[in-house]
Image (spheres, helix red, strand yellow):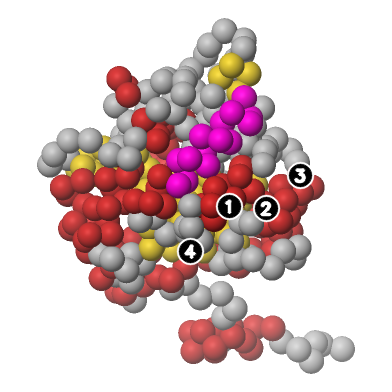
């Protein structure tokens, strides 16, 4: 018999499609990454990230106000550290007057209600571009964790609402939670990059911060000894559940689009909010294809963001955030 159920009925026109739509994007879905540099009057475009910029602190005001006006209420801060301040000890990361600490205060001054999240990892501060301290040819986990905990206290004391450890050292969430609590910073949350893969999609980000790992004797030029193997799935669940048990308020999967199976799997296994980071390489790929006229930029952007949310993301860190919201407003 010809089917009783004709599925096309629910696709007949925009009104019925909107009525049955499962995934809807709003400004509340987004965290906006912001790159900050030392200096004055700087708004420089990142070569491999067209239409994305590094800002000096004095030019943050216009940007932060325009985000807030669009309904984008949370930012994730990254700093580009001058070469002469980089070392193998994370010294500058703990400077209470460092660029990150000043950036947090600046954003809070401009817009006190803006949710400020900060990247906690040593790579922008490392002369080797690694997320940890190197001793005897190894990334030293436990030494690094101590510094990450101190760094978190420093960010929280400057006013950060959430610290976001992106380093993938073992045990750092517990160490950070304990350190924050010990300093009575009980309201500061932790968004853990729990399932962060060793990915070539981070290339443009490392250009933006000049933080690519360099080859040093006996230490590999990649991050494969701490970030996860992209061939693995079970490990993501293990990492995520451990981070939740250690006190993570929000967990994250990173990168986004190529890892939506992981997102969906985690969604079915945990009960805390899940963030997905649509990373720099994903942004660059679409910008490049659109520049060549090979893809419809806005249509593909919306499809990708919707796919990330459909897979199970409760929040999305994305370089497209502003463009998406502007597009939604114009519809
Ligand atoms: C630093 C960090 C990286 C990203 C976020 N935090 C780079 C890396 O781990 O090498 C990547 C973000 C992106 O590519 O957009 N630990």
Measure the alpha-carbon separation of dots 1 and 4: 11 Å
Residue 228, percent across and down?
A: 67, 37
Q: Residue at label 4?
A: 187
Q: Residue at label 1?
A: 177
Between marks 2 and 3 in the image, the one whose residue lies nearer the viewer: 2
Q: Does 112 sit above or below residue 230?
A: below
Disc on the earlier residue, 2 or 1: 1
Residue at x-position 63% and y-position 30%? 141
Measure the alpha-carbon separation of dots 3 and 1: 22 Å
Measure the alpha-carbon separation of dots 2 and 4: 16 Å
Residue 70 visible (yes or no):
yes
Disc on the earlier residue, 2 or 4: 4
Residue 201 visible (yes or no):
no
Residue 134, percent across and down?
A: 56, 19
Q: Residue at label 2?
A: 246
Q: What crowding class fits label 3: few (fewer than 14 Cα within 10 Å), some (14-19), or many (20 or more)?
A: some
């Amino acid at each position: 018999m010809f089917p009783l159920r004709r599925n096309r009925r629910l696709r007949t026109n925009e009104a019925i499609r909107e009525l049955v739509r499962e995934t809807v994007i709003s400004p509340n879905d987004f965290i906006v990454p912001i790159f900050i540099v030392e200096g004055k009057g700087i708004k420089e475009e990142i070569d491999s990230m067209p239409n994305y910029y590094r800002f000096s602190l004095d030019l943050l005001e216009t940007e932060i106000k325009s985000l807030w006006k669009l309904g984008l209420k949370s930012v994730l801060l990254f700093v580009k550290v001058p070469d002469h301040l980089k070392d193998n000890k994370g010294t500058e990361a703990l400077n209470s007057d460092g660029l990150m600490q000043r950036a947090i205060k600046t954003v809070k001054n401009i817009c006190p209600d803006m949710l400020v999240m900060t990247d906690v990892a040593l790579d922008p501060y490392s002369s080797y571009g690694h997320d940890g301290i190197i001793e005897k040819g190894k990334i030293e986990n436990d030494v690094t964790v101590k510094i990450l905990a101190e760094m978190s206290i420093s960010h929280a004391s400057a006013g950060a609402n959430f610290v976001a450890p992106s380093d993938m050292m073992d045990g750092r969430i517990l160490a950070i939670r304990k350190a924050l609590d010990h300093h009575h910073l009980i309201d500061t949350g932790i968004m853990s990059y729990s399932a962060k893969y060793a990915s070539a999609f981070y290339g443009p980000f490392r250009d933006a911060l000049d933080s690519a790992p360099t080859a040093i004797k006996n230490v590999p030029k990649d991050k494969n000894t701490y970030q996860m193997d992209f061939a693995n799935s079970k490990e993501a669940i293990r990492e995520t559940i451990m981070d939740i048990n250690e006190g993570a308020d929000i967990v994250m999967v990173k990168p986004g689009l190529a890892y939506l199976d992981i997102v969906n799997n985690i969604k079915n296994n945990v009960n805390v909010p899940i963030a997905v980071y649509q990373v720099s390489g994903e942004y660059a790929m679409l910008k490049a294809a659109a520049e060549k006229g090979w893809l419809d930029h806005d249509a593909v952007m919306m499809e990708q963001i919707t796919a990330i949310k459909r897979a199970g993301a409760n929040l999305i860190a994305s370089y497209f955030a502003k463009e998406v919201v502007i597009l939604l407003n114009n519809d």
